[in-house]
Amino acid sequence: MSVSLKDVQAARQRTREFIYCSPAPHSAALSAMTGQQVFLKLDNLQRTGAFKERGALNKILMLSDDERRRGVIAASAGNHAQAVAFHATQRGIRARIVMPLMTPLVKVSSTEGFGAEVVLHGANYDEACAEALLQGEADGMTFLHPFDDADVIAGQGTIGLELLEQVPDLEAVVVPIGGGGLISGVACAIKESNPKIRVVGVQTEKLPSMLRATEAGKTVTIPAEATIADGIAVRRAGELTLPLVQRYVDEIVTVDEEEIAKAILVLLEREKTLAEGAGAVALASLLQHKTSLDGQRTAVLVCGGNIDVSLLAKIIERGLVKDGRHTRLRIHLTDRPGSLHQLTKIIADARANIVQTGYDRAHYGVNLGDTVIDFTLETRGYEHSREISDVLTAAGYRHERIE
């Protein structure tokens, strides 16, 4: 194996002065929702908002004087970029980061804010990585791989050592997987310390590169796909990480985009913590009962919180609709003075809040002298929406729900 428990322990000693030991509180709410005893490992609270600091710093601290002088270069969709930018700049090391063209603005701005030079190139991580390798070779810079590097893997594994101390009688750990650097390090630390603890990996259905690699027994490149879990959008698992996953990981499951979005919203509303798509996939797998775990004391990694605000707004709005807390009704009524007042009074008496309206007198089969109004209502859920519908029907209003 490329990484051992001793390597992870050495990484912890090397980095502990500079890395925040993130909390792992028990969540009563999520435990009730999932059927597990859930402990959230909140590495979204790191200085740069994600776990990537651990591996990047461990690698940077092991650079030679000549490598430091020549500077470092990395490719990343965001979190590794910020980690390298912050810890390299803090030590006076020049850092250049190549990021895919569609990287969320918040991650680009943060990376530049931490002092790195940012180059936008390519449609995905793989194209950005190829460009970073070319530029690094041309300019004599040291390439810092985001996951397929033994020192990076050992650094990420420090999360596992912290969990063993923070969660007494730990029985399972659920970890997001992109290229495999995080789960490889964590699984090595966990399994070499206590082989009875189960390690479950979670990928997005859009890009299950590690799952496909374990099925094939070798790394394979899968087609590119867009996903809200951009932090784990990796088309090919690592050559170093695959053997570690094969040895230490008990199970790999996948979650879809809607399930990830729901987990983001649950974390925000129930736990008051912000997770990006990649940071929420582990919880998503438990909420959807995708794993074979059954009631265990389970650590769930919330490994990143760098989400684009506009995407978050869409997730919140969509989540409210799916939960029935936002509903849209198309209501027919007579186009005469007082009709709207009478209708809105009925809605108000039903304790619904009108958040948006739209009139139409020419479409939807509207009779002359009538109108149609689309109402977006804020409700308490599906049952409340049905009550409102029943009230409108009893009052003689023709209406329908708009999906």
Image: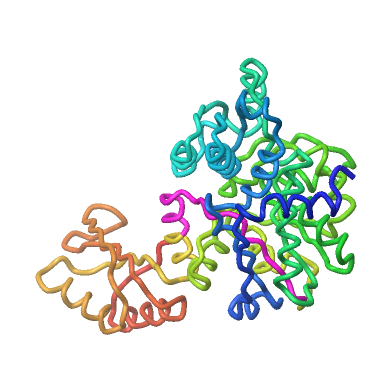
Can residue 303 be found in the magenta stretch? yes
- Res 299 → quadrant: bottom right
Which quarter of the image is occupied by the N terminus? Answer: top right
Residue drawn 67% across the image and 56% down it: 255
Q: Position of residue 124 (x, y in %)?
A: 60, 33
User: Closer to the camera, 147 or 143?
Assistant: 143
Instruction: Say whether residue 153 is left or right of residue 245.
Output: left
Residue drawn 67% across the image and 34% down it: 144
Q: What stretch is highlighted in magenta?
A: 296-315
- With respect to residue 264, does 243 lie above or below? above
Coloration of the structure image: rainbow
Residue drawn 76% across the image and 78% down it: 295
- With respect to residue 141, does 43 lie above or below? below
Check the image and name the residue furthest to the front. Answer: 65
- Res 359 → quadrant: bottom left
- With respect to residue 223, does 331 lie above or below? below
Task: Inspect this view and state whether residue 226 appears.
Answer: no
Check the image and name the residue furthest to the top. Answer: 138
Instruction: Say whether residue 86 is left or right of residue 6.
Output: left
Can residue 337 be found in the magenta stretch? no
Q: Where is residue 399 in the image (x, y as percent from the top left)?
A: 34, 70
